Amino acid sequence: MLTLDTLNGATAGAGALLSLLREGPPRTRTELVQLTGLARSTVSLRLDALLRHRWVLPADDVVSSGGRPAAMFAFNRTARLVLAADLGVMHERVAITDLGGTVLAERTADAPIDRGPEAALGRLVRTFTDLLDESGRDLADVCGAGIGLPGPVEYSTGRPVNPPLMPGWDRFPVPEWLGERLGVPVLVDNDVNIMALGEHRAGRQQTGQLVFVKIGTGIGCGVISDGRLHRGAQGAAGDIGHIRVATADDDVLCHCGNVGCLEALAGGAALAARIAATGVPATGGRDVVALLRAGNRDAAQLVRQAGREIGDVLATIVNFFNPAAIVIGGDLADAGEHLLAGVREAIYKRSLPLATQHLRIQGSELGDRAGVIGAAVMVLEHVLAPEAVDSALAG
Ligand SMILES: [Zn+2]
């Protein structure tokens, strides 16, 4: 008798087969048998389950092995959709992606986050619904939502914890609130972590060891170790903004209460404040970059010096973690070589030769889109994990 248990047993392991197809080219049944070392009948059962749920489709390509052409099977990137949002302090970017993390529709808006969670998340639900409508799809096609927030997030609960720039958000149950309205699993992390994920997975970073540094109003970094995001015990890993810069004067006070923090010296807000003190209006990193591009010498000098201070802190991280790549993103990264030159200078001066021998230090490849793409990647890693696919097929 065919019970549910035997059916589950037949498709358990289908998730691993899907991973194989997702990470590689289309394959024939024979290739899948060879690659997995499983019996042909087992591969067929798992493949049938994946085909039935449209996770996999017959590929158009066929290969001829001398006789009859063999059918090929490919991961179906269009099987489901992912909702992704990168909420900043002042701006937001909201997108729908396919299962490959490709953006299908997106919208950006000026949207201050300090009006509280229900205002921001209510608007987000409306934007997701609009984007789905415009794409001719609906929530039934969605497998999950990924949200990036501009503050510390306890990853296990998806709740912001004492976020300094988000009044009213402390401990707000973001996943539950959105999950109730969207009817899909919701994952939340801080913006720097999702940018690191986006840059690592969707960018062309061929390395498992990467440090992504966001230089916006504040400064933070996301750490990819052995190909996975390293969040730390509580989700606070990578908070380099409050590391003391060795060369800092004692009179530079940070909003955290300490003196000489990297963020208080080299963050976009700090640089803008110093420009403003010379009588030139500037409120953030974007203004500083605009002034630099317009030929303002003070701005160029400040950015170069900020690069050295950031490099000074990163040199310690290079010695400690030995990344293969450091990717710089955020508003101030648009200063390009003016910033990178200072970063490189300090890192090469202070790091050990073995650690810098093959180290790449470069600007972000995804730019403003790193966050939404990373938010989608966070969801994909969750819903396409082999055990998650197995239980979806069993359920
Ligand atoms: Zn500080």
Image (tube, grey):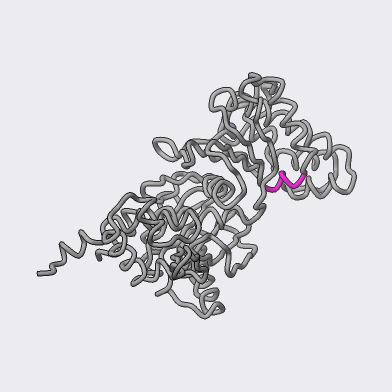
In the image, is residue 243 above or below residue 26? Answer: above
Residue 98, how many percent across, how many down?
Answer: 51, 66
| Residue lying at the far left of the rendered structure | 1
Residue 384, how many percent across, how many down?
Answer: 40, 57
Give me the residue at 70% from left, 29% from top: 309
Magenta portion: prevailing SS class: helix
Q: Nearer the viewer, residue 108 or 256?
A: 108
Q: As drawn, is 309 to the left or to the right of 228?
A: right
Q: Is residue 334 magenta?
A: yes
In the image, is residue 338 above or below residue 369? Answer: above
Magenta segment boundaries in residue numbering: 330-335
Residue 355, how many percent across, how many down?
Answer: 61, 24
Residue 267 seen in this snapshot = yes
Q: Nearer the viewer, residue 42 or 366?
A: 42
Can you say which quadrant of the picture contains the C terminus? bottom left
Residue 100, how many percent across, how many down?
Answer: 51, 60
